[in-house]
Each structure stands twice: as C-alpha cells, then as structure tokens.
Amino acid sequence: MADPLWLSIFGATLLAGILSGIPVMLILGGMPVLVALVASLFGAFDLTFLQAYPQRAFGVMQNSLLVAVPLFVLMGVLLEKSRVAERMLMQVGRVLGGSPRALTIAVLLIATLIAASTGIIGATIVMLGLISLPAMLRVGVEKGTASGLICAAGTLGQIIPPSIVLILLGDQVANAYLDAQQRAGNFAPDAVTVGHLFAGALLPGLALVLLYGLYVGVRVPGGSSTPWQDAQADNPGIWEVLREALPPILLILAVLGSILAGVATPTEAAAIGVAGTLLLTAARVRSAEGVTERDTASAPPSEGLAATAVNAPGLSGERRSPAWLRHAMTVTGLVAFALVGLRLTGVGRINLASGDVVLTPGAVLALVLTVILVAGLILAIVTLWRAGVLTAALGQAVQVSAMIVGIILAASMLALVFRGFGGDEWVHGLLTALPGDHRSMLLFTLLVIFVMGFVLEFVEIVFIVVPLVGPILLQDVDPVWFAVLVALNLQTSFLTPPFGFALFYYRSVAPPDITTGVIYRAIIPFVIIQLLTLGLVFAWPPLATWLPSVLFG
Amino acid sequence: MEQITATARVVHHTTHTICQLLLAIIVVGQLTVVILRYVFGMGFIELQDAVLYSFAALVVLSLPVAQADDTHVRVDVFRARQSAFWQGRFDDVAMLALLLPFFGLTIWWVWPDVAYSWSIFEGSVETGGLPGLFLVKSCLPLACVLMILQGIAGMVARHG
C-alpha cells in the first residue's frame, strides 16, 4: 500500500540530510532506518521488512561483477601516480606544434584516453586541471574555453568504456530487464551483459568527443600566437611520441577489446588492465637511486609536480627508471601480446586440464612466454613495492572503492525501506498514469535522473532509480538504449550548473582568478552539446544499439 | 577517552593493512585465473573462490577505513560555508542518529544468519569450492562493530 505522507517525509529527510554535508553513505543507510523506526511507532511501517537487509548486504558482497570495481579503481590510481597521461600530453602537444588549437585538441584527445582508462571523474578533472590548464593558458587559450573543455572532457570517463558507471548500470539493467520481460510474459529473454553496454556506449561517446572537438576547433584560433615555450628546445621525433602514447593506447585497446570480443568478463579484463598498468608504472617509477643522483640537484621533488613537469620537461621529467627496467617492462608487454596472438591463431594452446599433454612447438613457445610474462610482472610488482608506490596505490584504491561500495550497501537499505512504504507501487502508478507511450515514461525517468544528478553521485542513482523504473520501463524499451541514455544523462547532469559535481571538482583545482561565474558560463556550450547528443540517441536508437547487435548477434 | 582514540587508531591501521592485502590477493588471484584459463585451459574453483571471498571481506572491511579517514563522499554545497563548530555538530548527529542505529541494528538482524552459518561451518556454494564462507559472512557484523568504534573515536576526537 503506497503511503504518500510517509513517502514525502522520507524524501524530504533524505534531501535535507544529503545537503547537510553528512557523508552520503550514512544518510542513505541511516536515514531510512531512522524514518522506519519512527513510522513503526505510528504503526505505518512493519519493521520485519528490515530483517531482509543482511541477505541484500551478502548479495552485494558476493556479486562477482562488482569485483571489477576495485580493480579498475586501482588501475586509475596507478595511472595517475605514474603520470603517464601528463607525459603524453607534453609529447603530443609538442608534435602538434605550438598553436593554441593544436594544444586544445591534444588535451581533448588525451582526456578521452584518460577517461577511458580510469573512469573516475574526480581524478580525471583534477589531473587535467593541474596538467593542462597552465599549458593552455600560456599559449593563449581563453580561460573560459579551457575550463569548459577540462570539465566536459573529464566527465567522458562515465560514458566511454570501460567505465565503472556502465559496469554498475549493466548489473542493474540486466536484473531489471529480466524482471520486466517476465512480467510481460517473456520467460526466456536474451541476456544483457556489460559487454552489450560497453559496445552500445562506444559510438555515442565518440560522437561526444567529435562534437567537443568541432566546438573547440571553431572557438580556438589556429594561428600560433605565442609559440609554446619548449617547442624549439628539443624537437621530439615521432619515436619519442610513440613511446609515450602507444603503451597506454595499447593497454586500453587490450582491456576494451577483450570485453567487446566477448572473450573476457569485465573482472578478467580489469585484472589484465591492472597488470598492464603495473608494467607501465614500473617503467616510469622514480627509482630511489635516480632521486639521489639527479633530481635532488636539478629540481626538488617537493616542488609542484605539475609545474616542474610542464616547465622543464627536458630536465626532470624524463628518465625515471633505469633503462634495463624499461626494456624489461616493454618486453613483458610484448610477450603478453604475443601470447594473445598465439592463442588467436590457435597454436599456443596447452591443455593441462586434459590428461595427455602434447608439447607441440607452439605449446613450448607459449610456456616460455608465460614464464617471461610472470617473471616480468613479479619484477614490476617488486619494483613498485620497493619504491613505495604499490602500497600507496593500494591504500588509495581501498578508500575510493570503499566510497563506492559503501553507497551501494546503503542504497540497498534505502530501497528496502522505500518498498516498505509502498514506494514501488507509487512509482508504478505514476509511470502508468503518464499520457502517451513508453517514450513519455522514458523522458520522465530521464528528467528525474537529471534532477537527482544534482545532489547524488552516479552510484546512488543507478542503484536507486534503475530497480524502481526498470521493471516497468524495460517491458517496451531496449535495455541497451535505456542504459546509454541514462549514462549520457547522468554525465550531462554532472556538468550542469549550479550543482554539477564536475564543476566542484574543477573548482578545487582552478586558480582563484577563474571565478565560479566564468566556469558556469564556459560550460553552457558543452551542456548544449551533451543535450544534442542525448537527443540524437533518443531520436535515433541505432546509434546505441547497432554496434552491440553486430558484435553479439 | 584517550584509550578509545588510541585503540581506534591501532584498529584502523590494522584494518587498512588487511584491506590492502585483500586487494592485492584479488589482483594476483584474478590475474592467475586469467593466465591459467587462457593459456593452459585450466580453472580452479578454489582460486576463483579465494578472489570472491577476498572481495566480500574487502567490501565491508573497507567501510570503517574510509570512515576513520573521512573519505566517504559528502555533498559540499552548504558544508563549505558552515563553521567548523557546526560541521562537528552535524557529524555528531550523523554518528548518534544514523551510524549507530544503522550498523547496530544490522548486527542484530544479521546475527541469526551468521550463527547458523557457523553452526554448519558453511562453505562455498560451488562444489569443490573453498570452505570458510562462515568466516567471510562474519565480516559483516565485524565491520559494523568497527564502524561504530570509528564513529565513537571520531566523536571523542571532536570533543576531546
């Protein structure tokens, strides 16, 4: 039985609690318990409902899909610490020449890569703000355009796979879709996987990048106004640039490719991603000897990291690890790809599971390569551990994933109490009472998510809204299309002033002379681009559904 | 009072280290699973279970770590303008009215499940899987106790 009075009290206390600045996890988990306890005094809530909570908590703990979350977080943290992106930006910017437009496009491209590899909005925006803002301002890019680009490009991590948002959405949408199809009488629906969502989000994500690029291309002058400071200092060859840019690109292709090819699960792909990142990071770690030998003399490590790297790339930013270590890591990486190649051609299969092991030349080769791979990985782990990078990265990854899973655990308590107050029937009534077909339901849902995005992080929204509306909506709506629209919508919501999360993250790193007003004005064109893309996907679903149907049949 | 703070700090460092170890096990374990599966065509349910168990423990045990370090996400729109005094009062309310009932009652609700799990020494649902699921399930009430401990320690620190 829906209970409008208690539902509105519930909603109001949640909103007030979230805005009070108390950790969102405590509000989403504690406030429902509190309201339920009070309501039970008035006989409006049956407390036995809450005894189901431990089962839900165990469900989150034993969800094998979620294992990918801490792995992708660790990958992002390591990439940030190794400053791979920073060096890529420097190299690509130099090659593209000193013009403001070239640099801006370089920032966009690199941001896309970082977004794809880390998927953590806050981290991406802070990193971009620190690295690329000073460089862009120096060559004369207007500060509004630079700010808007950093905020907008920083949120791409939500939509460009592999993204944590899409993994969590995949979990929820798959359950909701199954539920919806059973309600509609279809007892054997095709399964929706995270792979479907990744494939579905790829084209809309790239469309966004293209539109951003067109906008800044028109907005930023192409002529070289102030030549980039170090453009003449040393002219990097194409080899230099490839060495910086190629490994991260290969890493992302490997992770994404293994999921899209349907070979690996997201968790397995995430493990591959972490392994690749370990190699990348070990090849760039500032070794203990390196610090004492050179860096103490040339630049104190305590000085602003971003500043030293951008100002004097020739001095301190270059050789961190001994050459043999970099070569060892390169070899290990190549070996990994060779193994994949062997496996694809089918020669390198050693089936130890079957009784008779036949050591064909291919199998011996695979065995040798595996030994090299494992040795290289161990070397990388030991190097990073001795440099103190590994412990720090693990510690930070634990905190970030605690934040994410804490919200998931709390949101399942919220969902339980919401159901106890008859909230699901209320939502059902609301949706079915809307005039028009499923498109008006969808529009309404997107609007609600957009507004919720002002006060909540994506994890809460995914775990609160999708289980509520999904079972009704997905009876008529394609699940991949729905998920891509939700992801795009959330991303737009995070960019929209005055409450966009992306803008808060950027505010924390932007210099004071870039006022909040400047940021708000600068982001408007990007929000329009977002809405345009959202409208495009809404009006033309194949943009999201075509690629998955080709890849997964 | 000082004893609570000191105990909480030691417990926090221990939990954080355990969480780092669990994450390391997840990385190494999952990577081993991948290599064994794609190169050697082998799979060990025990190994996959070890990864899943580590993750289950990490999920709940990382919560008190983030609580002690104050890294659970907050919405800062109004908090940024509050004085330190009011920020502290809000955190006190959060501790007494939200954290304590939520995690306290969770211990109460989960107790029968965990007791039953111990009574049969519940193992993996997979045949041939790892034993010791009862220990993993016990992490939930344990994490609740740790949350309450860190909550109290935070409050003591604010008023001490």
Image (tube, rainbow, N blue to C red):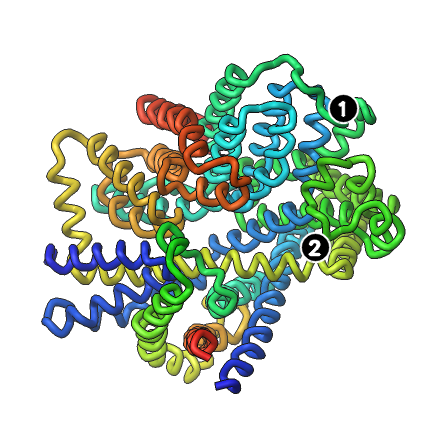
Quadrant of residue A449 in the image? top left
Please name the residue that numbered disc 2 is placed on: A352
Query: Which residue type carries mark 2?
Result: Leu
- Taking A341 as reference, is A403 left or right? left
In the picture, the disc for residue A488 is: none
In the picture, the disc for residue A231 is: 1
> Subunit of mark 2?
A
Residue B138 rendering spot, x and y as whole percentages? 45, 77
- Taking A328 as reference, is A250 left or right? left
Instruction: Tell me which residue sits at (75%, 29%) in the image.
Output: A242
Q: Nearer the viewer, residue A411 or B147?
A: B147
Q: Nearer the viewer, residue A164 or A294?
A: A294
Quadrant of residue A51 in the image? bottom left
Locate the C terminus of chain A and report the quarter of the image it occupies. top left
> Subunit of mark 1?
A
Q: Are marks 1 and 2 on the same chain?
A: yes
Instruction: Tell me which residue sits at (39%, 61%) in the image.
Output: B83
Closer to the chain start, of discs 1 and 2, is 1
Residue A53 rendering spot, x and y as whole percentages? 31, 68
Q: Secondary structure at mark 2?
A: loop
